[in-house]
Amino acid sequence: MPVAEPRICGVDEAGRGPIAGPVVAAAVILDPRRHIEGLADSKLLSARRRSALAIEIRRNALAWCVAASSVAEIDTLNILRATLLAMRRAVEGLDPAADEAWIDGNRCPELCCPARAIVGGDRLHASISAASILAKTVRDAHMLDVHRSHPHYRFDRHKGYATREHLLMLERFGPCPNVHRQSVAPVRARLQRDLLDTGPVA
């Protein structure tokens, strides 16, 4: 009997760099019988193309899972450990489970299967590209939901990244509770200024 090929999942994240919002990770096992045309690093694709590919990935992949680490977890653990935690959650959520995980980057989370870190993997391996697309589209959709609740921060435009516009909104309105990461420098500095302005209680 032919030996079944190992189920290899690609793993990638979205949201390590922002100063607001969660970090989201995805794990994808592609089905070799269902080719998905046009998979690439999510950063190289338009939002419309990412959304279309995300639908195809969910429909045609052998397995996929998206998971996250919250802002509170990022502030407690630090962004690297929170990212690895989100990746582990995504891999552990696969059904069927992966035999091996290929991780975009230079660090691997602790997993119950063998794992390999691949720098630039989202441009080299289709399964990691697929994971990058799912992670990016899910996180962007979440930030759009946040925008609807807090439109004055304009999260729909910058998705939590430290753009000039975002930093101006942070200065004007202060940190958004449960959305801005208090452990990152711009937010921490703004919080400290608020404490200084408040002064000691009489």
Image: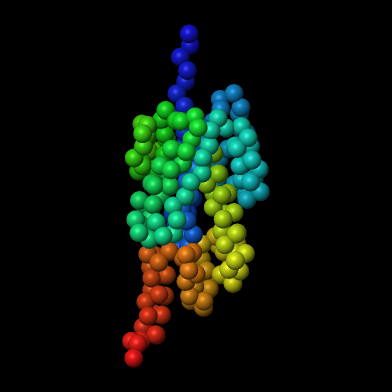
Image coordinates for residue 181, horizontal then vertical, percent: 43, 64
Q: Is residue 63 above or below residue 81?
A: above
- Residue drawn at point x = 61 percent, y = 42 percent: 54
Give the total of numbered labels: 0
Image coordinates for residue 197, horizontal then vertical, percent: 39, 85
- Residue drawn at point x = 50 percent, y = 32 percent: 95
Give whichever of 38, 21 is nearer the camera. 21
Kindly tell me whether residue 161 is visible in this rendering.
no
Left or right placement of residue 113 versus residue 2 in this view = left
The colour scheme of the drawn protein is: rainbow
- Residue drawn at point x = 47 percent, y = 71 percent: 175
- Residue drawn at point x = 33 percent, y = 87 percent: 200
Give whichever of 107, 176 is nearer the camera. 176
Image coordinates for residue 122, horizontal then vertical, percent: 48, 41
- Furthest toward the front, the residue is 202
Kindly tell me whether residue 79 is visible in this rendering.
yes
Give whichever of 38, 87 is nearer the camera. 87
- Furthest toward the bottom, the residue is 202
User: In what quadrant of the picture does the C terminus appear?
Assistant: bottom left
Left or right placement of residue 196 versus residue 29 in this view = left
Left or right placement of residue 160 versus residue 141 in this view = left
- Furthest toward the top, the residue is 1
Image coordinates for residue 3, horizontal then vertical, percent: 46, 14
